[in-house]
Image: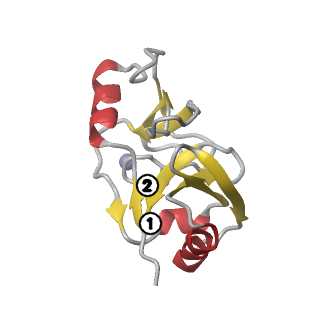
Amino acid sequence: MTTFHVHSIPDGVADEVRTTMRAPGYGHPAYREKAALGTGPCRQCLRTFAVGAEPRILFTYQPFTEDGSLPAPGPIFIHASGCERYEGATLPPDLRSLPLVFEAYANGGRLLAQDRVSEGASDDQLRAVLERTGADYVHIRHGEAGCFIARVSC
Ligand SMILES: [Zn+2]
């Protein structure tokens, strides 16, 4: 059975944003607000925000790290105060209630498949994408907003 690993953004990126209030690598100002509409999760702990309660920071992030891949910067949120990074061999619980897209890539950033998954995404669905495409990694994106959520390696 194919195993996989879900990676949220590196702690160093989140720490830098909280300290400088600027987007790492870009320098654009980051924006702090109380969580409002939108279901995108914190990209560090991969938990959804308590709307109207939790402060969060919006900033520009570039999720591709491989040589040769085309950068794809986009807006993401993290909790404004520190939280614990998610790392695990299963989809985090809060992502299962969101519409998702599993984007399968080969090394070098070549897109192999883009599977829309309605709410209720499962580890089996993710495993099936990896097995069908032979992907080197997968990006999980929000199925409505389109923004990057997490990276999956196998
Ligand atoms: Zn968080």
Pinpoint residue 142: horizontal percent, then vertical percent: 63, 51
Q: Which residue is mark 1?
A: 92
Q: Position of residue 148 (x, y in %)?
A: 56, 45
Dot 2 surroundings within 10 Å: few (below 14), some, or many (20 or more)?
many
Residue 143 is left or right of residue 122, and the answer is right
Within the image, what quadrant is residue 30 found in?
Answer: top left
In depth, the one of 121 and 67 nearer the eye is 67
Whether residue 121 sits left or right of residue 114 in the image: it is left
Relative to residue 23, is residue 96 drawn left or right? right
Look at label 1 and name its amino acid: Pro
Q: Provide residue 131's location: percent of width, then percent of height.
A: 57, 74
Pick the quarter of the image with the C terminus.
bottom left
Q: Residue at x 32, y 43 (%)?
A: 10
* Label ID, residue 152: none
Q: Residue at x 61, y 71 (%)?
A: 121
Residue at the location (31% across, 19% down)?
Answer: 20
Q: Which residue is mark 2?
A: 46
Please, what is the three-letter code of the amino acid marked with disc 2?
A: Leu
Query: In the rendered image, which quarter is residue 147 located in?
Result: top right
For this view, does 112 lie left or right of residue 81? Answer: right
**Mark 2 residue's CB less than 8 Å from ligand 1:** yes
Indicate the position of residue 40 as horizontal and vertical percent values.
57, 48
Q: Are marks 1 and 2 in contact (CB under 8 Å)?
A: yes
Above or below 22: residue 109: below
Q: Earlier in the sequence, mark 1 or mark 2?
A: 2
